[in-house]
Image (cartoon, rainbow, N blue to C red):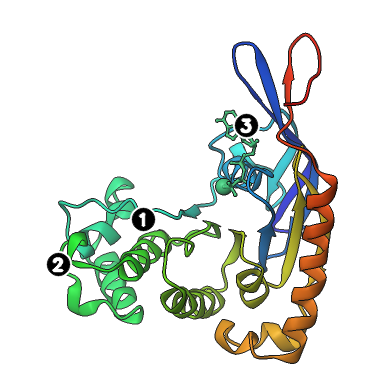
Amino acid sequence: MSFLTLDHVSHHYFSKNNYTKALDNISFSVKDGEFIALLGPSGCGKSTILSIIAGIIKQTAGEVLLEGKLINDSDLAIGYMLQQDYLFPWKTIKENSLIGPKIGRSKTSEVENEALKMLKEVGLSNVANSYPNALSGGMRQRVALVRTLITDPKILLLDEPFSALDYQTKLKLEDLVSQLLRSYHKTAVLVTHDIGEAISMSDRILVMDSNPGSIAKIFEVPLELRNETPFLVRKHPKYQILFDRIWDELNKNESTSGQTKVVSNQNESQI
Ligand SMILES: Nc1ncnc2c1ncn2[C@@H]1O[C@H](COP(=O)(O)OP(=O)(O)OP(=O)(O)O)[C@@H](O)[C@H]1O
Ligand SMILES: [Mg+2]
């Protein structure tokens, strides 16, 4: 059975006088422990898909199932990691990483020890009692990762979590995150603009088309690449071959798609 299923999901954003068709008939499934990437141009609906999976917005049509249950009936914990880390500046790194258990009233000494262990794993034990403003962007994202993982989510939604970082930090974090997620056997959906990041971190890549957002093509990442760290994947001969195929697919989509389609309630028009 698939772990996560999107079945003919469409979404419209409504405003007073018009609506935007953000997603059109999206169907895909993700297996338990699988890491997939959603890759596509700005505005193709990647974040909208994550918000729907997280239950933050409700799709206008179709179904989303987690372990066979409708998303709103599921009590599985979902972890969400964004481009911005949203750390509380007045709380220490340790306190920030324990926000989830604190809100959920499950902050036991065992969970505290687990947080300290995870902070150590991501190389931050020496700053556990510091405040976020003393940390670099990459360190802050590592805190955000611990804060997400400490709630033991069954699925992780990653919305461009590395895109604000410099290239070197980004590569190191990609290595760390993929190693951690694999060792904890997490299912993950990564949203990215970066072909290299998608290839080096995921098992499958869903390339999206825009206006309205839809799945254009699905690429399987070869096994040889999946067993390497993201840094080493980029040096593998099969990496460039897959990169070029995805590049061509994205270019094909770009040349066929128009601008954002906003549909008025009365007449359909394109702006
Ligand atoms: N709250 C909203 N109200 C109206 N339209 C929205 C809203 N959020 C997103 N949209 C529109 O829906 C479409 C998909 O947006 P979404 O943010 O999901 O795209 P994205 O692929 O994540 O883009 P990016 O790569 O820039 O983050 C876009 O046309 C966007 O303008
Ligand atoms: Mg987005």
Crowding near the residue tagged with mark 3, few <14, some 14–19, many ≥20 C-alpha atoms within 10 Å: some
Coordinates of residue 122 in the picture (x, y in percent): 35, 78
* Residue positioned most to the top: 266
For marks 3 and 1, the one nearer the N-term is 3
Q: Residue at x 42, y 71 (%)?
A: 166
Question: Which residue type does callout 3 highlight?
Answer: Lys
Report helix, strand or loop for mark 2.
loop
Label 3 near label 2: C-beta < 8 Å?
no
For marks 2 and 3, the one nearer the N-term is 3
Position above or below: 100 against 37: above
Report helix, strand or loop for mark 3.
loop
Q: In which quarter of the image is the C terminus?
A: top right
Residue denoted by label 2:
130
Report helix, strand or loop for mark 1.
loop
Coordinates of residue 64 in the picture (x, y in percent): 70, 42
Q: Which of 210 and 57 is in front in this view?
A: 210
Hey, which quadrant is residue 131 in on the image? bottom left
Q: Residue at x 22, y 64 (%)?
A: 93
On the question of residue 1 being in view, the answer is no
Residue denoted by label 3:
58
Hey, which quadrant is residue 24 in on the image? top right
